[in-house]
Amino acid sequence: MAKKPTTDSSRGEETRLQLIEAGMRLFGQHDFESVSTRDLAREAGVNLAAITYHFGGKKELYRAILETLVAETEPLVGPAMAELRQGIQAAKGDKAKLSRLAAGFVTGLLKAFVPGQRARWRAALVMREYANPSEAFPILFEGRIEPMHKTACQLAAAATNRSPEDEESIILAHAVMGQIVVFAIAQVILLKRMGWDSYTPERLEEITRIVIPSVLGSLGLSAGLPAPPGMKVKP
């Protein structure tokens, strides 16, 4: 079968994606001002003029990178958040059901945000935005961080019989999220301490096994529940 000819539009989209991929890597390693348009073009293997043509400039490319980060993580966390919100309503305050929901939420987020080189690029970029928010931070906050945080607030509120907008619910949710995202944004520390070169599925399973009781404890939910499907529990 003859190979379809490459069209101008498909080449243009390929170039655009190459620049986004290159930018995600470079902006994860260096701050915004340290990355030049020449660096970006060189890393992407494209002509320097392609940045202006496809995005308008470096700032616009950076915004597109954050928009891509939000979009590509939606399939990873969107269904988990929706399931948790629905489960909280159905649980009607039942502590055992809330515990299982919390365990599933922890498991899902760790699987979504921790493994793989791409996850490390995303985590590094997000960490830079946490430390020194740019003008584009609202893209990340409104598109990914705030929805996750509000979902965790609903869980914290249900576990403690408070409103999701209560200050204690918000702070408790922040503590819960911190116990999860730290394994992505600060994974270099754990890898160094453990003598690991990466998170393998087995290591991630061990992390999840240990983190779940910690999260349940912070929420005041019962421990000793069955592990999520597929997870081995040490005696």
Image (spheres, grey):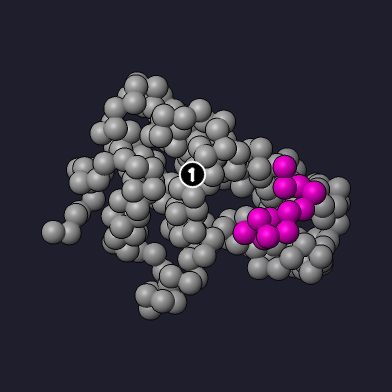
Q: Which residue is mark 1?
A: 172
Q: Name the side, left or right, on which 124 lies relative to 211.
A: right
Q: Residue furthest left?
A: 235
- Percent x, y for residue 188? 50, 71
Label 1 CA crowd tier, 10 Å (few <14, some 14–19, many 20+): many
Q: Secondary structure at mark 1?
A: helix
- Percent x, y for residue 149? 54, 40
Residue 126 painted magenta: no
Q: Amino acid at mark 1?
A: Leu
Q: Residue at x 17, y 59 (%)?
A: 234
- Answer with the quarter of the image where residue 122 lies: bottom right
Q: Is residue 227 above or below residue 85?
A: below
- Percent x, y for residue 62? 75, 52
Q: Nearer the viewer, residue 69 or 147?
A: 147
Q: Nearer the viewer, residue 87 or 222?
A: 222
Q: Is residue 177 visible?
A: no
Q: Residue at x 49, y 50 (%)?
A: 175
Magenta stretch? 127-138
Residue 131 painted magenta: yes
